[in-house]
Image: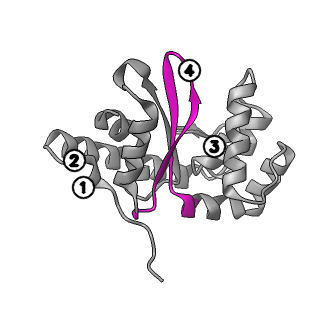
Amino acid sequence: MPDNIIVDNCSPTLAGIKTGSIFTVDRSLITDINEDLRELNRCFAGKGLRAIPLKITDKNVLVYLYRPDKLKADLACREAREILLEKGYTCESVEGDIVHLINQICNQKTFPHEIGLFLGYPPVDVKGFMEDTRKGVKCVGYWKVYGDKEKAEKTFSSYRKCTEVYKKCLSGGRHLSQMIVNTTRIS
């Protein structure tokens, strides 16, 4: 799997400042998706990151790169749980919720908007988008903001800066494995 695609789409997640990212890989760029994901997950081993396919078609693969510990904390929030329960999630385990998300992506005609919760977007913004994509939008960046505009703009700025730094590191010869921030805690 090309490192530049991961860096272009997932730098804030690699850096540990974002819960998750999704990206699409053209099937012509990979020989064996399962082997590529195994290799990627070996690179992430012990660093608090995981990559899984959300949807595989003849043309491309939609990949979810995420930090399980951050996702667990995000989905434990009352507002996030309310949204997910309303959408048929059990909220019994993060893994179960991811399986439900995969089913939603593969079986629905429209993309499930609750995916924002799995990417680390504020629940107020996810809910605002689900209610009306145009009404009440305060700004647009990595997502549409319906809540705290100033906080979102700072977050967008940090994501952009992080991506610029990671792209520069990659073009300077650093390997993806050298750019992953380890967020796991040793007990």
> Of marks 3 and 1, which one's residue comes earlier in the chain?
3
Q: Secondary structure at mark 2?
A: loop
Amino acid type, callout 3:
Gly
Quadrant hosting residue 36? top left
From the image, tell me which residue sits under label 2.
Answer: 175
From the image, tell me which residue sits under label 3.
Answer: 116
Position of residue 159 measured from the top left corner of the image (x, y, whole percent): 41, 48
Position of residue 29 measured from the top left corner of the image (x, y, whole percent): 35, 23
Give whichever of 115, 27 is nearer the camera.
27
Which residue sits at x=66%, y=47%?
98
Q: Nearer the viewer, mark 1 or mark 4?
A: 4
From the image, tell me which residue sits under label 4.
Answer: 57
Q: Are marks 1 and 2 in contact (CB under 8 Å)?
A: yes
Where does the N terminus fall, quadrant-wise? top left
**140 shown above or below 16:** above
Q: CA distance from mark 3 to mark 1?
A: 28 Å
> Of marks 2 and 4, which one's residue comes earlier in the chain?
4
Q: Nearer the viewer, mark 4 or mark 3?
A: 4
Q: CA distance from mark 2 to mark 4?
A: 28 Å
Q: Is residue 52 visible?
A: yes
From the image, tell me which residue sits under label 1.
Answer: 178
Q: Return the residue found at the far bottom.
A: 187
Residue 29 is left or right of residue 51, and the answer is: left
Query: For the magenta stretch, what is the residue range?
Result: 46-70
Amino acid type, callout 4:
Thr
Instruction: Indicate whether residue 147 is drawn in magenta.
Output: no
Residue 86 is left or right of residue 24, and the answer is: right
Q: CA distance from mark 1 to mark 2?
A: 5 Å
Q: Colour scheme of this structure image?
A: one colour
